[in-house]
Image: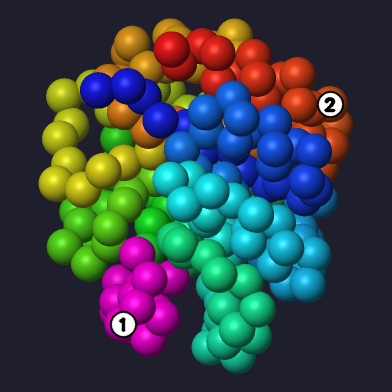
Amino acid sequence: MTVKAKICGLTDAPTLDAAVRAGAGYVGFMFFPKSPRAVRPEQAAPLVRSVPEQVKSVGVFVDPDDTMLDRILAEVPLDILQLHGDEPVDRVAEIKAKTGLPVMKVFKIAEAEDFEPARRYEQVVDYLMFDAKPPKESNRPGGNAIAFDWALLRGQSWTKPWFLAGGLTADNVKGAIKLTGAQLVDTSSGVEDGPGKKSPEKIRRFLSQLS
Ligand SMILES: O=C(O)c1ccccc1N[C@@H]1O[C@H](COP(=O)(O)O)[C@@H](O)[C@H]1O
């Protein structure tokens, strides 16, 4: 199976186009206001509407309440919801039932025991994502360009498709795939020239490493 990538934190048509044309399987839009990659619903809506059917549009949320989900989903036709906060398993199930959309729950990893909570969510979610634990001083739970010790994933098996995330770049993604066996990878900071400034060239380079 070919490894598929999600290019996350897209904010404009040229970089979305670069990701789609270079073969991204998933594109991500950030609905966390403190993120340098945050998009407003009216900004995201035309971008998501332009995405071809075979590419899935993922909305990234951090502990969203129902009002926020209702407001954004009324405007933006997302395919998948990525939950990157501290959402308990029953809230994840509630969001999935309420929206009717596939959900991806993110687990922040620094040591082996950080995988344990994922076992409680496996039956509820459609996708898992493993990202690095954010540094204490960060004001966001993801998008920190930090990788965790990928060797921690060795020997683990999961009943749902899972993404490897955190600090992936064109220079390290091949090694990360080889070490972990990931079939799905995700990047945001690694294809930027600065926080929130996606680079079409870096997106193309990243995706070229997967074929
Ligand atoms: O990018 C952000 O600002 C962000 C904010 C809040 C939650 C998640 C966020 N980013 C996601 O984190 C992973 C890994 O990012 P990176 O490649 O290490 O920059 C990815 O899914 C980002 O979209």
Question: Picture quarter containing residue 88?
Answer: bottom left
Residue located 51% across and 38% down the image: 6
- Residue 71 shown left or right of residue 164 in the figure: right
Which corner quadrant of the figure contains ligand 1? top right
Magenta-drawn stretch contains 99: yes
Residue that badge 1 annotates: 97
Question: Picture quarter containing residue 150?
Answer: top left
**Coordinates of residue 19 in the picture (x, y in percent):** 63, 33
Whether the residue carrying mark 2 lies under 8 Å from ligand 1 is answered with: no
Whether the residue carrying mark 1 lies under 8 Å from ligand 1 is answered with: no
Residue located 70% across and 38% down the image: 17
Mark 1 belongs to which amino acid?
A: Ala
Q: Is residue 121 above or below residue 135?
A: below
Other-residue count near label 2 (Cα within 10 Å), few / some / many at <14 / 14–19 / ≥20: few
- Camera sees residue 202: yes
**Coordinates of residue 174 in the picture (x, y in percent):** 45, 11
Residue located 65% across and 54% down the image: 50
Q: Quadrant of the N terminus?
A: top left
> Of the residues under marks 1 and 2, which one precedes in the sequence?
1
Q: Which mark is residue 147?
A: none
Q: Nearer the viewer, residue 44 or 110?
A: 44
Q: Is residue 171 above or below residue 147?
A: above
Residue that badge 2 annotates: 193
Q: Nearer the viewer, residue 93 or 140?
A: 93
Residue located 80% across and 48% down the image: 12
